Image: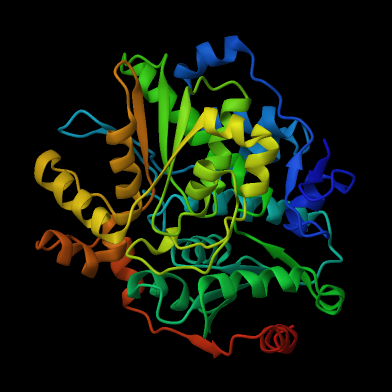
Amino acid sequence: MLYYSTTNRQNTATLEQAVIKGLAADGGLYVPQRLPRLPKAFLRNMSAMTLPELGHAIASFALQGDVPTDVLHEIVFESMDFDIPLVKTAGGNYLLELFHGPTMAFKDVGTRFMSRLLRYYSTRHPEWTTLNVLVPTSGDTGSAVANSFLDMPGVKVYVLYPRGAVGLIQKAQFASLGRNVTAIEVNGSFDDCKILVERAFLDDELNAAMRLTSATSINYARLIPQMIYYFWAYVQLANSGVDTSNLVFAVPCSNLGNLTSGLMAQRMGLPVKRFISVENQNNIFYNYVKTGKFTPKPTQYSIAPALDAGCPNNFGRVMELLGSHENICRHIHAYSYNDDQIIETIQQTYREEGYLLDPHTAVAYRAMKEDVQPGETCVTLATAHPAKLKPLMERIIEYPIAMPRQLSEFLKSERHVLPMKNGFTSFKRLLLSNN
């Protein structure tokens, strides 16, 4: 199956080329020429499957034989070796906890899948020397990517993050690793970090000297595994006897990768009535839904740093999947909340329902409660463990919270950081000097 660029449909690539390149040469994102629809019999029989079994079956349908069955089986079973439980709060609301992986954020699923897929491709190309993974982060992406590729032979990871805008624990998850992971502190915003990486992919001299790829949601390999947990939520609801005929998902959004994966699952046949997209004050997609105008703007820092994005990368993919502003409004209800509203939601939910929401999940949970209609079943995607922002959370609820072992281990190690001026010349020089 071929994948085309959202900028120009004539620019196509194989799955291998799309995954290795990450970004198309014309700056667009790769989209499959078609997404096969799952047989209705498969949807009826999903309830008998484990998470890895379900993941392998759906990935096999989606990738249409582009990855050998035995290889894909190994990739999926290695990527999904932790639980993704559906929990019900004391208030009767459902959350899909996506944060039980190594770095305790939903991005573990996608980055682990992608790292193992790239490992497979590298075995087919013995002429490759080093694959350089570039990743801008506001916190969770960098830690998930760094840990997924840690000590992988023939791979170097460069994590770019904005100075003063990433929490201590999140920074420790990638800056304490060393080995094949380099943490670069940029004197700029998250948007500046994204621009540096995007310019690197389009720089002829860099690409002639180094093999570059991305592990953010601009890379299509991130979206396939994220699609799977939407099906998993459906399976858990059905197995519990919950009515799934009017299923709604509330999704915290920044670069729209998670929402794109949900739309892909819907396209493949998952019976979803609609999605609720929720942003913090960086509400570019919210404004688009309300006005029909997509207007990126500089990032505003918030207490939900993983949502701090001023130009959502996957907007082009959303447009490809739904086709028009009118159709987007039919399938997606959009909301946006500021820091004060996030804090209010965390405090109220903890007090009334006994569940501690992290700030990213809190925006979606609040929107779910405002948007859900009688007869609907809504699942909120819980995207990060609250302890990842422990000092902030303790100030909000005025109560100490436990630190999971896998997070506390990162804090024991020394951080290794390369400070860098905000400029492409500096970044290019750094990459070439480490080549």
Q: What quarter of the picture does the C terminus occupy?
A: bottom right
Q: Residue furthest right?
A: 10
Residue 213, placed above or below residue 91: below
Residue at the image position 63 percent from the left and 25 percent from the top: 268
Q: Is residue 223 above or below residue 59?
A: below
Above or below for 159 versus 38: below
Quadrant in which the N terminus is drawn: top right
Residue closer to the observer: 413 or 70: 413
Residue 334 in sight: yes
Query: By what rule are the colours in the image chosen?
Result: rainbow
Give the total of numbered labels.
Answer: 0
Using residue 24 as the reference point, say whether residue 48 is left or right of it: left
Report the side of 267 relative to 375 (left or right).
Answer: right
Judge from the rendering whether residue 29 lies leftward or rightward of residue 140; answer left or right: right
Please tell me which residue is depicted at 74% across the width and 58% down the height of the picture.
23
- The one nearer the camera, 51 or 162, is 162
Please state the horizontal and vertical placement of residue 69, each as a whole percent of the image: 71, 33
Q: Is residue 50 visible?
A: no
Please report the residue visible at 64 percent of the width from the left and 14 percent of the height from the top.
Answer: 39
Residue 191's place in the image compared with 122, above or below, is: below
Residue 309: x and y in percent read: 50, 62
Q: Position of residue 285 (x, y in %)?
A: 52, 49
Q: Residue 395 location, x and y as percent?
A: 16, 67
Residue 321 quadrant: top right
User: In the visual, does 320 lie left or right of 190?
Assistant: right
